[in-house]
Image (tube, rainbow, N blue to C red):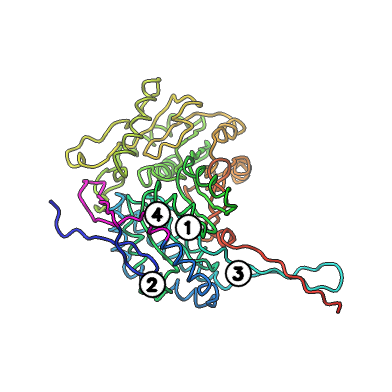
Amino acid sequence: MVINVRTYELFIGGEWKKSDEKIEVKNPFNRELLAETFIASDNEVDETVLLASEIQNHWKDIDQPKKAEYLRNIASSIENRSEEFAKLETRECGRPIVETRSDIESVVAILHYYAGLADKIEGQTIPVQGKRFSFTLKEPLGVTAHITPWNFPLKLAIRSIVPSLIAGNSVVLKPPVEAPLTCLEFAREADKAGLPKGVISVIPGTGSEAGEALVNHEEIAGIGFIGSLEVGRQIAEKAGQKMVPTVMELGGKSPQIVFPDVDIPKTAQGVMGGIFRASGQSCNAGSRLFVHEGIYRSFLEELTRRTESLVLGNGLNSETDIGPLINQQQFEKVRRFVDQGVENGVNVITGGTVAGDKHLNKGYFYHPTLLTNVEKCSPLDQEEIFGPVMVIHEFSKKEEVIEEANNVKYGLYGGIWTNDLSLAHEVAQGIRAGGISINEYPSVFPQLPFGGVKNSGVGREQGKEAVENFLQTKSVTINLDG
């Protein structure tokens, strides 16, 4: 029995409130109870959105430098608690502390970036025929809903809501029920910073109730969603019926391409980080590896050696490289993908098994896995597994590998490893993806737009483009001829 477990309430309209239902938040490393949190029903969603709507007109009229000041104050508060935030996120989603520390640094950087961008939202003057003066105004949408996932809970939430805030919208965040705690702590810091009550609300809840109620609410004027393709399609359909704009980052099945001129040890280390970060639970995980035939065997040997040296364990331990999967459902999904592949003749180079070590047997651990002899039309090669599993192919020509890299329904990200700059440019242009990293994986910064093509999403997060998702343009023309 766990005692003194903290209970989190919903953050609605600047106040902490209870609801009729609570859920448990458990550490995926050992399944111990971390906290309890109230979750929102459609009633709480309605209350939250209406309060956000009431405050939005006030928020949009606040000077942009003042909005920036709020963001900087929140950033400073989070930075002062950075180690606490990192440890809490490690406990709620299992990721190694070195990763979560980096993510909290990114959160602070995102807040500062958009604070700097706040007073740079500008319209245009546009010459038109006759004696007229025409210009455009950039105006907020109103209240925006943001539904975010559990793999990078605070970072992805901040990445979604902050561009909308500086655009002048009030925001309602539905963080994941599996890992809502750092998002709720963020709400606490926003409140301490003096942000007007109702500008930010944070209401954990299930997708089937709270998420659906948010998407369907008549006062929601824009939607940001990060998650699966299947759920994204459902949200897009409902948003389309209401004519509400959306920005979505959905699934990925991203290629990493290794050409024969690379430094093999250094590149193998980089490739490995591209797939095993967050235990492979990342939308832009580089899960499809293409290695040139000239170095295929030697590269595979190096990659295997390094993969087998990875340490699985408690994310709070500094020596841990890979933490657990988030829950039983995700664990079973990964195991099912690999087991079915093995039944169909896939060759397991390393991994492919549940971690049976005594100190890991309470967690959702799956050994990092490298697979060859994978059919290019099979689920292992085509579907997003969201686990520490990489499929490896051999190639001989650049034209061949570009075609194979594009032969999936997703187009979120891609990686190219070569010292030939001309080749890198050519292949980068040939791959249909929203982002490409060359000689590292990934490259994600607040000022770089991030998003996908094909079934990987619509719109862009990060950068100046992210703000445009949450603005609408009004044209104004003055007739100057009497």
What amino acid is found at the position of numbered circle 1 in the picture? Answer: Ala
| Residue extent of the magenta highlight | 20-46
The CA distance from mark 2 to mark 3 is 24 Å
| Residue identified by numbered label 2 | 76
Q: Is residue 39 magenta?
A: yes
- Between marks 4 and 3 in the image, the one whose residue lies nearer the viewer: 4
The CA distance from mark 4 to mark 2 is 34 Å
> Does 415 sit above or below residue 162?
above
What amino acid is found at the position of numbered circle 2 in the picture? Answer: Ser
Relative image position of residue 234 (x, y in whole percent): 50, 43
| Residue identified by numbered label 1 | 145
**Kind of element beneath mark 2:** helix
Mark sitting earlier along the chain (4/1):
4
Name the residue at 55% across, 44% down: 237
Say the numbered circle drawn on residue 121. Answer: 3
What amino acid is found at the position of numbered circle 3 in the picture? Answer: Ile
Q: Please state, as top left, top right, bottom left or bottom right, where the C terminus lies in the image.
A: bottom right
Mark sitting earlier along the chain (1/2):
2
- Between marks 1 and 2 in the image, the one whose residue lies nearer the viewer: 1
- The answer to whether mark 4 and mark 1 are in CB contact below 8 A is no
- The answer to whether mark 1 and mark 2 are in CB contact below 8 A is no
Give 186 or 111, whichever is nearer the viewer: 186
